[in-house]
Image (cartoon, helix red, strand yellow):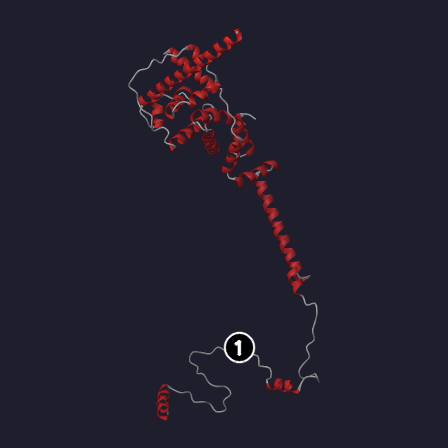
Amino acid sequence: MTEEQLIAGCIQQRPNAQRSLYERYSPIMMAVCRRYLKRNEDAEDALVEGFCKVFKHLGQYNHQGSFEGWIRRIIVNECLMALRKKHALKNAYEIQEHFDLRTDENLSAKLAAQDILKLLDQLPNGYRTVFNLYVVEGYKHREIAELLGISINTSKSQLILAKKRMQELLTAQAQQEARGTARASVSNSQ
Amino acid sequence: MENKDQFFEQFRQQAEQLRQSPRPEAWQRIEQRMQPKRSQLRSVRSRLGVSPRVFSMAASLALLIGLSTILFWLGKTDSASPGPLAAAQTVTEWEELPSLESTADTPREVVQIAVRYPRPKVAQPIVEGRPDQRLVARNATTPRRVPTDSDSTQQRKEGRMSR
């Protein structure tokens, strides 16, 4: 079934089409929810709410831009609403100091899809939200500031702090791996 | 700056590849939220492959046939055989009660009492009168004088005197 047929079927409230659409996009959107929300249960709640809105407002989709992008925007909004409900975005603040944000190329090259969630889970809500919106969703700082009700400088600060924390985490992870390989080589030589 | 963008780009590419299947309960929750009755009806329609108009026409025709069948059955049972409740109440055994006057075995006193108290007459419906009419006793041989207001006060006085 093509995307157009799926959309038409869902507008006509056909259960088969709704199920097919859900099965096609739910793994991608669950991963989106999981990037914003630490707990699987919270991510699933946002997914359910988001898909209910998708099916309800599908008639408003004007076929401009990708359909996946349209669903993604709804899902991201649901995640932000869930974070606002928990007052998780209240502690975002501006920073005055400057950090060296150069990243070791070897570190970023080793970054795997599985590491993404591990890294994000270790960040505070403010950092990870701004980081996701800026880096993955491609929002500008002005748009993020409007979405989250914070200043543009706070948005920039959160991004810098998120990246700094990630650098630290990746460096620590690389050091651990280096120690592990060194131990393994020593035991092999003995 | 270039290095920073590279990290972000790497992160974005990896994040785009990320997939996580939700639990099966998530779809059940969505189904429950989307008006279960309507969706069930639509699933029946889609299974049958019938358009909504034809489906509603068929449903109303089935309803009409069902109602007429029930009405026909009810009419038939009233005229012919009794229903289960009526059958339960049907007389299965008759007991003959002897008449007081006719039997010879009846004690005399009982017969006398029965004769003393004849059957009561069947009450007749009251005939509606007019507002200007007066109440008069029917069986009286001489017409009674209907007391006026002055007479009634006089009688009351006399009554007091006699007492």
Splitting the image into 4 quarters, where does residue B112 fall?
A: bottom right
Q: Is residue A91 above or below residue B47?
A: above
Query: In this image, B112 relative to B1: left or right?
Result: right
- Residue A132: x and y in percent read 41, 22
Image position, residue B15 (x, y; %): 46, 20
Mark 1 belongs to chain: B
Amino acid under disc 1: Pro
Q: What residue appears at the point 33 percent right and 15 percent down from the top-left corner?
A: A99
Residue closest to the eye, B158 or A94: A94
The image quarter containing residue B80 is bottom right
- Badge 1 density bin: few <14, some 14–19, many ≥20, Cα 10 Å: few
Q: Looking at this rendering, what residue extends furthest in the left direction?
A: A96
Q: Residue farthest to the top?
A: A189
Kind of element beneath mark 1: loop
Residue A4 located left or right of residue A79: right
Residue that appears at 60% across and 50% down: B64
The residue to which callout 1 is attached is B125
Q: Is residue A57 left or right of residue B123?
A: left
Query: Residue A47 at x, y = what percent?
Result: 47, 30
Question: Quadrant of the image for the N terminus of chain A?
Answer: top right
**Residue at the bottom extreme of this rendering:** B162
Q: Nearer the viewer, residue B19 or B64?
A: B19
Q: How many marks?
A: 1
